[in-house]
Image: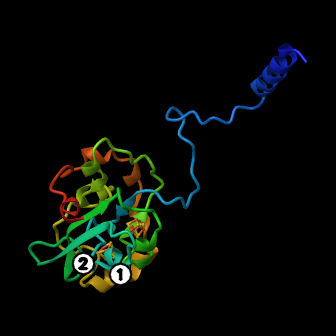
Amino acid sequence: MSILPKSAAGFGVTFSHMFKKVVTEEYPEKPPAVAPRYHGRHILNRHPDGLEKCIGCELCAWACPADAIFVEGADNSDENRFSPGERYAGDYQINYARCIFCGLCIEACPTRSLTMSNEYELARDDRRDLIFTKEQLLAPLLPGMEQPPHAMRLGNSEKDYYISGPENPGMSKGAEGRPVDDAPGAGSERRTGEHR
Ligand code: SF4
Ligand code: SF4
């Protein structure tokens, strides 16, 4: 048998694929939509008055199998209040070089402070930029919210906040679309990179 028929057969395979439907994603021009419950980057949510839902309890950090979360709690005071109740997260960081997006941290969070968005564009040129600071993770202030620290506006005790908190996880709207590198405090000291 001559070489020509074999070549023609080979090209035949090529030509047959030229007329099939293209399955290539046009990324990044047209980013593909993900499932609504896709596990993307995290968001630290706020109460409707702007106070932070995070109470610095560290349960998320203990639940994380990849040791990707660093939390350092601090005490609230009447003059310096960031969340309802006694404690808030003085520092909070997630290392996306470690995170496997399993979602165990958000299951552990007792206040629904920590949720996950659909954002998946997390590639960075520098490993240090994969450690997201609290300022980068915090949900932006929506209309009606006030930048903490400030007094409790929704009740006299943290119970007034926590009763509605679990049913009110929607304060992250828009956070996933915010350019994290523009967030106030972005690029501040990242501690997880130092000891992990
Ligand atoms: S999604 Fe999983 S790996 Fe990532 S920070 Fe949460 S618990 Fe850790
Ligand atoms: S995000 Fe939730 S679990 Fe983690 S420290 Fe804050 S309140 Fe606790």
**In the image, is 77 to the left or to the right of 10?**
left
Location of residue 21 in the rendering, given as x and y in whole percent from the top left corner: 75, 32
Residue lying at the far front of the rendered structure: 1
**In the image, is 172 to the left or to the right of 91?**
right
Location of residue 133 in the rendering, given as x and y in whole percent from the top left corner: 24, 58
Query: Disc 1 to disc 2, how far (Cα)?
Result: 9 Å
Location of residue 64 in the rendering, given as x and y in whole percent from the top left corner: 38, 73
Location of residue 155 in the rendering, given as x and y in whole percent from the top left corner: 27, 80
Indicate the quadrant where residue 112 lies: bottom left
Is residue 161 visible in the rendered image? The answer is yes
Q: Camera-side residue: 167 or 67? A: 67
Residue identifier under label 2: 84
Residue identifier under label 1: 162
Indicate the quadrant where residue 105 lies: bottom left
- Find residue 173 and name its label: none
> Could you classify mark 1 by the number of other residues whose Cα lies within 10 Å: few (under 14), some (14-19), or many (20 or more)?
some
Q: Residue at x 19, y 65 (%)?
A: 195
Q: Residue at x 38, y 45 (%)?
A: 123
Give SS at disc 1. Answer: helix
Q: Camera-side residue: 27 or 46? A: 27
> Could you classify mark 2 by the number of other residues whose Cα lies within 10 Å: few (under 14), some (14-19), or many (20 or more)?
many
Is residue 141 visible in the rendered image? The answer is no
Q: Residue at x 28, y 61 (%)?
A: 145
Q: Is residue 180 above or below residue 91?
A: above
Q: Is residue 162 above or below residue 22?
A: below
| Colour mode of the rendering | rainbow
Task: Name the N-terminal-most of marks 1 and 2.
Answer: 2
What amino acid is found at the position of numbered circle 1 in the picture? Tyr
Q: Residue at x 35, y 57 (%)?
A: 96
User: Mark 1 and 2 residues: CB-CB less than 8 Å, in contact?
Assistant: yes
Give SS at disc 2. Answer: loop
Q: Camera-side residue: 63 or 9? A: 9
